[in-house]
Amino acid sequence: MAEVTSSEAALRRFLHGLPGVDQVGAEQRAAGLGTRSIKTTAKAFAIDLAISMVDLTTLEGNDTPGKVKALSAKAMRPDPEDPGCPATAAVCVYPDMAGVAKKALKGSDVHVAAVATAFPSGRAARDIKLADTTDAVEAGADEIDMVIDRGAFLSGRYLEVFEEIVAVREACRGAHLKVIFETGELQTYDNVRRASWLAMLAGAHFIKTSTGKVQPAATLPATLVMLEAVRDFREATGQMVGVKPAGGIRHSKDAIKYLVMVNEIAGEDWLDPDWFRFGASTLLNDLLMQRKKITTGAYSGPDYVTLD
Amino acid sequence: MAKKVSTGSANGSAFDYAPAPESRSIVDIRPSYGLFIDGEFVDGHGKPFKTISPSTEEVLAEIAEADASDVDLAVKAARRAYTRVWSRMSGAERGKYLFRIARIISERAREFAVLESIDNGKPIKETRDVDVPTVAAHFFYYAGWADKLEHAGYGPDPQPLGVAGQVIPWNFPLLMLAWKIAPALACGNTVVLKPAETTPLTALLFAEVCQQADLPPGVVNIVTGAGETGRAIVSHPDVNKVAFTGSTEVGRAIAKSVAGTDKRVTLELGGKAANIVYDDAPVDQAVEGIVNGIFFNQGHVCCAGSRLLVQESIAEEVLAKLKRRMKTLRVGDPLDKNTDIGAINSAEQLAKIRELSDIGEAEGAERWAPKCDLPSAGFWFPPTIFTGVTQAHRIAREEIFGPVLSVLTFRTPKEAVEKANNTPFGLSAGIWTDKGSLILWTASQLRAGVVWSNTFNRFDPASPFGGYKESGYGREGGRHGLEAYLR
């Protein structure tokens, strides 16, 4: 598919030639999948799977090494009382905290993900974005969560967005690249579909809905459109790309709706932390409380799950 | 990588949804039911029959059969109620009863949903999210018209017709009852209604709702039975209006039997709707619309999109996506909240679907259905598509009334319209394209009562519904639906 990115015009023609998304229909489908009733054994399976897919995140101005170490400990052993509880997939931090997280997670399978490229706005010169990426990779990040230049995208400069993703991927030097669209700013599902293809063509390992800093963050219909995109991309190229909704997913019930959608839209191959992630913080504790409810038969309170 | 979760799977899928059955305990099915005449349940004089659950073949209850004398009693009760009470009551008062009925149905929604699913075989997901809410909405809608009839556009002082004889089918038992009873009552008529013999239970529960609402005796009468009972209603000399929903064959017989009388008639009959997918359609949503169009309610839908007309240039892509989507359809226990496709309503209907499908194969069309385990008891048919179908195939012309889709292709919009209209029916149609002008042009060319664009099988009480040609005449729903019950 190299020819579609050979020029601005060719890329635009390709992206605008993708089938449209009917907003009403897409939202109806997402809502319909949300009515699936996931109970007993299926629920237990989904909750453990969801825990293993969490990118446990802290992206605050007041993050400190202490906070990141605590979060890392939690990621490795979300439920200290139950060694059977899976670890989360990754800890997600700003680049300056990547080194702290790397050290804290040493010896575990939990990855370090760092947001880079002038996250969350992406409003900086390209060399600064690339330096930001390099800095995170050198500090030990296994995964880089970059933001696309929404300004360039919305003004139709698709090739510029494409080239930037390609350049960041190079700067990743082997680290996995997640590309954040900020779907709340792109607004239309047609844009979400175009951004998905654009990022996949540029070599993204994951496509991600949002930074969590803009409302609305992840939504079921936007994720639906992205899951359709990765499914169709594999059909067209044989390559699998992961999907990560992030921001606003706080309850187990919501997480399960996403997993149902992954299962029925992209297919069960994506039901794996290698191919689907949740960017979340408070979600983990709700998953843990639900998990405890299933194993003990009773709800525990917030005092029985650890603080982040 | 992060720690993997071990996956236990029964059918090869990692994420195997555990059974999520809706409880039956909310419904109380009596061992036998009488006829609802003049506000009371009374014995019938015909030979009682049994209603079964199509998903298990379990006998649910014994139902009285109304013979001609019972129908006569029902019509007399309706006439009495019409003359003495209902036609004299102000519209505002009639509206209060209808609002009350609508509220009671909303309050007892889960009971109705479970009972409908058990008796009909349709998934609880549909009765819960479509049938019953739409029923309540229909009563709410027509309740609002009851005191505004002089503004409906049918003259300054429109009058009711009298006694309406109404015969409804088994595919949407309670919803068709609502479509018939709500406008009739709002306009000041009284009714004698016969539900289908395979699905009488929700109509009989509705009779209880009439009692609960203190509806004056005789305003609604429900008589159960099969074709003979229906004939007795239609041919009763004191019935002023006949409303029928069902097969074109029976509709034709009704039209003949009332010819030469002063009875008013509305008929809502069969269909063979074209669902037209143009090459610039939103493909993923179109696939949903195709699935919803033909597999909703096991395809037991008169307005089902049973002919897919897809532009040749995208046919391959659409079919590949459709097949993949069909593999995720869950066929099975109607009361399981995750079931997408339930049981076929009767052995008779199953035989008809099988016969026409076999004919499709014999005529050279290619049959495809996803692998699915069907329960051993009950009546089941997998979601099925036929490709390579042409206008000359019987499965492209005759109503199958089951989960069977015939796929045809076209080259140009003109050809699409010609093929869509090349049918004796004309109930509904669907159009899928991102181009607004093409939607408008296509809709203006289609001879079908309902045209959906970029959606399918959407119903609203405010929107009129009805057919062209052999799909019947008259309109139900909306302001137009009042016309059938006023003079």
Image (cartoon, coloured by chain):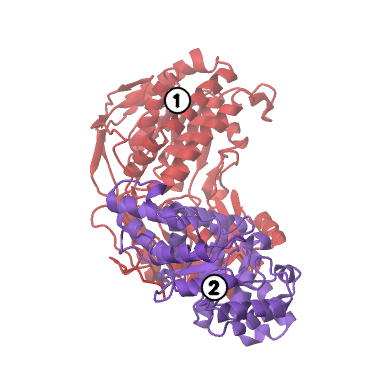
Which residue type does callout 2 highlight?
Ala
Task: Pinpoint residue B178: horizontal percent, then vertical percent.
Answer: 48, 34
Real-space Cα distance between discs 1 and 2?
A: 88 Å
Task: Pinpoint residue B227: horizontal percent, then vertical percent.
Answer: 35, 38
For label 2, the residue is A98
Image height of A214 relative to A3, above or below = above
Of all residues, the one furthest to the right in this rendering is A155
Of badges 1 and 2, the one in the foreground is 2
Would residue A277 be found to the left or right of residue A122 on screen?
A: left
Taking depth in this image into account, of B470 and B296 the one nearest to the observer is B296
Which residue is drawn at the image coordinates 39% and 76% (left, top)? A107
**Could you tell me which secondary element the residue under label 1 belongs to?**
loop
Chain B visual colour:
red
Would residue A261 be found to the left or right of residue A148 on screen?
A: left
Image height of B419 relative to B474, above or below = below
Which residue type does callout 1 highlight?
Pro
Q: Chain of mark 1?
A: B
- Note whether residue B317 is visible: no
For label 1, the residue is B237
Taking depth in this image into account, of A163 and B26 the one nearest to the observer is A163
Q: Are marks 1 and 2 on the same chain?
A: no
Which residue is drawn at the image coordinates 47% and 63% (left, top)? A71
Which residue is drawn at the image coordinates 45% and 39% (left, top)? B132
Taking depth in this image into account, of B73 and A119 the one nearest to the observer is A119
Chain A visual colour:
purple
- Mark 2 packing: few (<14 Cα in 10 Å), some, or many (20+)? many
